[in-house]
Image (cartoon, rainbow, N blue to C red):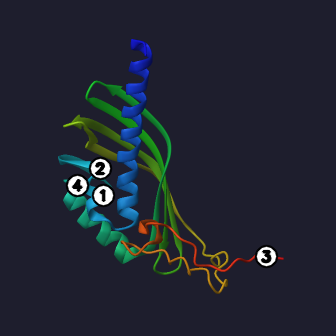
Amino acid sequence: MDADRQARMDALLDRQDIVDCLTRFSRGMDRFDRSLFLSAFHNDATVAAGSFVGAPDALYAWASALHEGGQVATHHNLLNMTIDIDGDAAHAETYYLFVGRNRDESNWIAGGRYLDRLERRDGQWKIALRTNMIEWSGIVPTLPLPFGDVPDLHANGAPARGASDPSYQRPLVNRRAPHIPQ
């Protein structure tokens, strides 16, 4: 493989490692998986998010309490992303869409961007500094959950915050009976 092709391959692998890092943050928060959440950050990282400014472990405690008290489910969706890599440092801008099913049955939706400085230390890309740019927010009226009346809808497992969520099941199996709607 020529040097230019190898450099492109290395850049793609670095980019994928950074995308995986950013995804661990979102999944860790939504599943209330503390270790997964913290694996996205260097221990000495600083995060500025809403009224919070501090370290990743304190962020997890604050954000998980906020979401536990306010929502029954959350989705931190990652959207458009730019990543600029310079050696062992990178800067990423990631658009996000946050949706939460509030305990009062309303739905909270918000959008913005995560601005991250990431560093590769000991071969691992992690967030060293994050600023959360919240750009808009609103409450959306509640409608019935689609397919909420299907009797065996949760036979494969019900959505959960934690290791009981079906996404942790290995191997993933189907326990629902075959059915083709008419």
Does the CB distance between marks 1 and 2 fall below 8 Å?
A: yes
Mark 3 lies on residue: 181
Quadrant of image for the C terminus: bottom right
Residue 67 image offset from top left, x and y in percent: 37, 70
* Residue at image location 38% in from the left, 36% down from the top: 92
Q: What is the secondary structure assignment of the residue under circle 4? A: helix
Going by the numbered disc 3, the residue's amino acid type is: Pro
Mark 2 lies on residue: 40
Q: Quadrant of residue 25?
A: bottom left
Residue 29 image offset from top left, x and y in percent: 36, 62
* Residue at image location 31% in from the left, 68% down from the top: 64
The mark lying in front, picked from 1 and 3, is: 3
The mark lying in front, picked from 4 and 3, is: 3
Residue 110, placed above or below residue 64: above
Q: What distance separates the C-alpha of mark 4 from that of mark 3?
A: 46 Å
Going by the numbered disc 2, the residue's amino acid type is: Ala
Q: What distance separates the C-alpha of mark 1 from that of mark 3?
A: 39 Å
Q: What is the secondary structure assignment of the residue under circle 1? A: helix
